Image (spheres, rainbow, N blue to C red):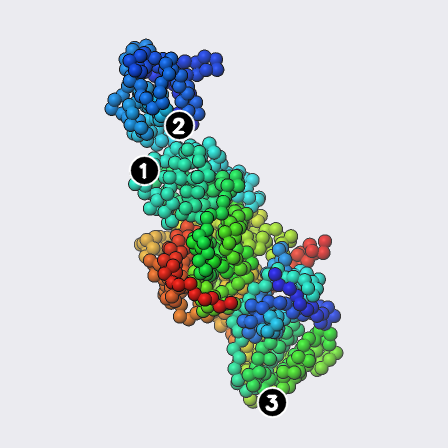
Amino acid sequence: MFQIVRKQEMAKGTIIRFDISAPKIAKKIKPGQFIILRVNETGERIPLTVADKDSFAGIITIIFQVVGKTTALMRSLNTGDIIKDVVGPLGKAAEIEKTGTVIMVGGGTGVAILHHIAKAYHEAGNHVIGIIGAQNKEMLILENEMRNICDELVITTDDGSYGKQGFVTGPLKTYLQERYDIKLVYAIGPIVMMKNVTKLTKEFNIPTIVSLNPVMIDGTGMCGGCRVKVGNETNFACVDGPDFDGHKVDFDELENRNSIYLKDEKDSLLFSIR
Amino acid sequence: MFDQDVKYLKFKTYLNTYCPHCHNSFNIEKKEEKSIVFKAKYNDQDIDLKLSPYLDVFDIETSVPIKEGDTLDDVICPKCKKSILNKEVTCGECNSSVGEVMISALSKLMPFYICTKYGCEWHGLSKADERKLKLKIPRQDMPEQDQKLRISNYQEVPYGYTTELALLEAGRCLQCKSPKCVDGCPVNIDIPAFISLIAEEKFDAAAKKIKEKNILPSICGRVCPQEDQCEKYCIVGIKDKPVAIGRLERFVADYERKMDLVKAPVISAENGKRIAIVGSGPAGLTVAADMRQLGYGVTIFEALHETGGVLTYGIPEFRLPKSIVQFEINYLQSMGCRIETNHVIGPLLTLDELLDNFDAIFIAVGAGLPIFMNIEGESLGNVFSANEYLTRMNLMKAYRFPEYDTPMPQGSKVAVIGGGNVAMDCARTAKRAGAGEVTIIYRRSRHELPAREEEVHHAEEEGIIFKLLNNPVKYIGTDNNKIKAIECIKMELGEPDQSGRRRPIPIEGSNFIVECDLAIVAIGNGPNPILFQSSPNLKLNKWGYIDVDPKTNETSIPNVYAGGDIVTGSATVILAMGAGRIAANAMHKKLSKKPKRKVKA
């Protein structure tokens, strides 16, 4: 039993933040690692990368966008409510080291995961450049938090309602062209965003790490549902990832695999509304 | 006819008994009264002796009172006046002389002995005749759910023996003096003893007898490959089919559970030492029960949200009802075992951290890393590992989608790659999920199928198609990247390989297409490294499984033991339990020498 100690609605109620009491996990979880939760007895197991933690208070933070049945169900929960199962930490932790200048690119709810990693890079003494994007001003999350840890921060929105108009790849290209000291790019967000970021950084030959979020069940390497092709090798995102060398990931395959259950997701939502 | 014969053994029904000399029938039947009448000599007096053999009890009437414990001097046929006392045979219980009559069994007369001592109720056939008679009883089949009915539900297929069938089957056991079946059992259950208790209708005692060695009889009775273990060595099996030991085991375990006769065992006084068990599958549960009984504090850590390991996520409901698994786990909890679900040992707590809090650890995480063939198209939509397919269906109850949120993988034409029990489970589950056509693709021939004969038989009954001596080379997808067909190649069998099975060799140019819209890869599992990553000093073998001392099942780290699939690779439930038993014994031996230590809070 895991209690939600704080619920915060971000972005017009479509992006939600939960602080969950999970002392054992909070003690161990590192940036880049994820948890799997199951809301209730009939619920499915969904993976969510942790956005922050407080080891002393025993709290982990997750931020999710309402996209399907389970996330819709989670939105209906409030502070004090219980989540039946939370298991973690799962996956490999991000490798944090002092390398110099790094660019952290985040899109949508990907910013939540990015924040946890960016914070670690900041604390390790790197010069952190943040580029975060969203559809519009309302959908932008964690702006202040990112501002606190980034040495430079650029914001983009698709419709230009805030920050620069356009995609995150715009400012990224500018940085890559202007600065020669960039050692690493971290890209976390929608698959199409990560795909375009890696295409761009490949031109400049900058190592790029992406964080993947494929369909998975157990999260411990047992089901193989989360298999992704990385450089002609089949990897399981849950135990070999979720972070991978972005230049080697087969994004097209990932996109296909993640769309397998779209129809079921719809059926499931319709069933729950009925 | 056979029913009748078996009952002779028990002398339960009214027997037709004849004089061995003149073949006169001793039986008298009057209205309500059925009895056998002899003349006898007692203390130099001629007396009439009347036996009413009902329900194992001899109701004896005599013309003169006989003292309890006295034996009759002679027994005489009332017609030919000859003695029917047989001086060469003695009573099986008190060594007194016996009267010999003839009974009709198996369409011929057989000698049948009745003790002449008053108060002793022994009676029976000679050992040789009893054996002959037993060998004539055929192996009893379990009643099953109709094959047309069962493919549209997930209820258990075999219903289990009725009391009558169990008694008949138990009557087949020869009670060998040096039973081979016990050696064939990985946990050495005293099989003749429990079967003899069944024959005496002491079902509860029979269940307790099994539980001395095996804490999960209702599970083992269902999923053990008995044909390769106890039943393989059964002496009856040399000429006939072996005694159905597994079905009898299941019968008594179910009887005990249904009649609410399960009692928590006596637990030794708490000894203050603590054991951590990683994984709640069969090996883990065995160690938990054994160590708890010896007075250790036991905590079981399970990575998933549900306990039972492969019993829960792997084996389908129609083969092993989940309520039974839960019953057994509740039993452990009632003994005082603690269970912690959602604990992935390794990332959440390392072995070192566990050793700070526990005196010993038993690792039983199973072999849970699915193997793929690494051929083209394996990442297409609707290509599943058996683990994922079964986990969705069993653990997440996807077959009840959308009531349960996990979507059910659906296909009208399903192909299952592999020939083991897991492949059979997948194929039969797919059939129940509504697939019109389910095909098993296996690279060797029927003879080499690793699945249990019973499972193959059930699969065939349910209309599963077997495409043998075929192997996939490529998965072919639709435009939207879902599978639509598998390209296979025909195989032929060559020389035997290391496993002793004939090696399959592809036949060049024999490629053909099998259409399907759902493919399940069930070709085995490897070791899951998630636990090892945080414990580099844990020694593994060249296949990545844990290296243990086979005598104690202790690993390279002192006080850390391991057993089950994580040591042997994919095997059976009972072998995992056997490994657990070895580790529990060794642990107890080592820990009882160790002084109680202070445990960190």
Secondary structure at badge 2 equals helix
Chain letter for mark 1: B
Q: Does residue A264 appear left or right of residue B142 in this picture?
A: right
Secondary structure at badge 3 equals helix
Q: Of the residues shown, which amino acid type is indicated by label 1? A: Cys
Q: Is residue B88 visible?
A: yes
**Real-space CA distance between mark 1 and mark 3, rounded to the nearest whole angstrom:** 89 Å
Residue B427 % position (x, y): 50, 50
Nearer to us in this view, A112 or B112: B112
In the drawing, what numbered circle is on residue A149? Answer: none
Q: Is B546 situated above or below A42?
A: below
Q: Are marks 1 and 2 on the same chain?
A: yes
The quadrant of the rendering that contains the N terminus of chain B is: top left
In the drawing, what numbered circle is on residue A178? Answer: 3
Q: Mark 1 highlights which residue?
A: B176
Nearer to us in this view, B536 or A118: B536
Nearer to us in this view, B334 or B376: B334
